[in-house]
Image (cartoon, rainbow, N blue to C red):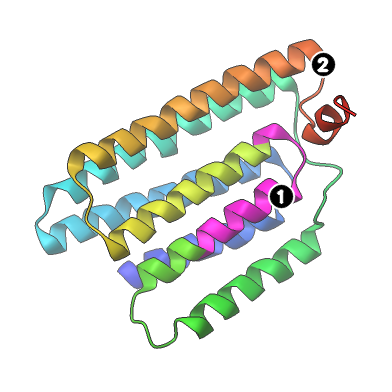
Amino acid sequence: MLQLLLAVVILSGILICGFRRVKLLTLSFAFQSLAITFICIIAGYNTKEVHFFIIGVLTLVIKVFIIPYIIEKSIKYLKVKREMDLIINIINSFIISGLFIIIIFAFFRNLDNTYLKTGLFLGLVGATLMIGRKKAITQMIGLLTIENGIILFEMSVVKLSLVLEAWMALEVLVLALLMGIMIFHINKTFDTVNTDYLSNLKE
């Protein structure tokens, strides 16, 4: 069951690389976070450790419900439906995500730790989204995808205290709220959320 859920997480990462519509990106992120929620719950059931259940519940509440709701409200206000001008086009994004999978699983072929491999993949996918897209709202989804990768990486390498894990989850929520407010004010001031345009203002 865990392997199936991790495969779903990888698939969602591939789809995130290829979607232009912000709504589909948000749904993919929420679906990915839901799969991670189940992974945490199953890990908690298998290990009998309460902190896995807690981080699973926090992931469910914050990343499956609250953050997608914030993004959905931002989409409606900003009237941003899709990315039109991509730095890395869709085909190349799919190719890059496929290369990430091949390289990671080949490099760590002797390591029986799918959490680590999937976490690294999500980190690279999120970084690609942040680099390859111009709109701040899609770059935020990339940052959140990296954080999902950190959760899986943390599950594979070290055992953090419950307090620290809860703090990380709350930081993500605060980050999403702050970025939502920033995007709102940027759009109000410059009538755009295209970071490529904003970077040209200082030239």
Please determine whether, in this image, residue 178 is positioned above or below residue 114: above
For the point 23% across and 53% down, the residue is 41
Dot 2 corresponds to which residue?
190
In the depicted view, which residue is nearer to us: 111 or 202? 202
Is-magenta flag for residue 123? Answer: yes
Please determine whether, in this image, residue 106 is positioned above or below residue 3: below
Q: Pinpoint residue 11: horizontal percent, then vertical percent.
A: 54, 64
Q: Pinpoint residue 9: horizontal percent, then vertical percent.
A: 47, 60
Q: CA distance from mark 1 to mark 2?
A: 22 Å
Element on which disc 2 rests: helix
Q: Picture quarter containing residue 136?
A: top right
In the image, the segment drawn in magenta is 121-137
For the point 63% across and 23% down, the residue is 74
Quarter holding the C terminus? top right
Please determine whether, in this image, residue 84 is positioned above or below residue 88: above
For the point 49% across and 29% down, the residue is 175
Dot 1 corresponds to which residue?
131
Residue 184 relative to residue 64: left or right? right
Q: Pinpoint residue 151: horizontal percent, then vertical percent.
A: 37, 52
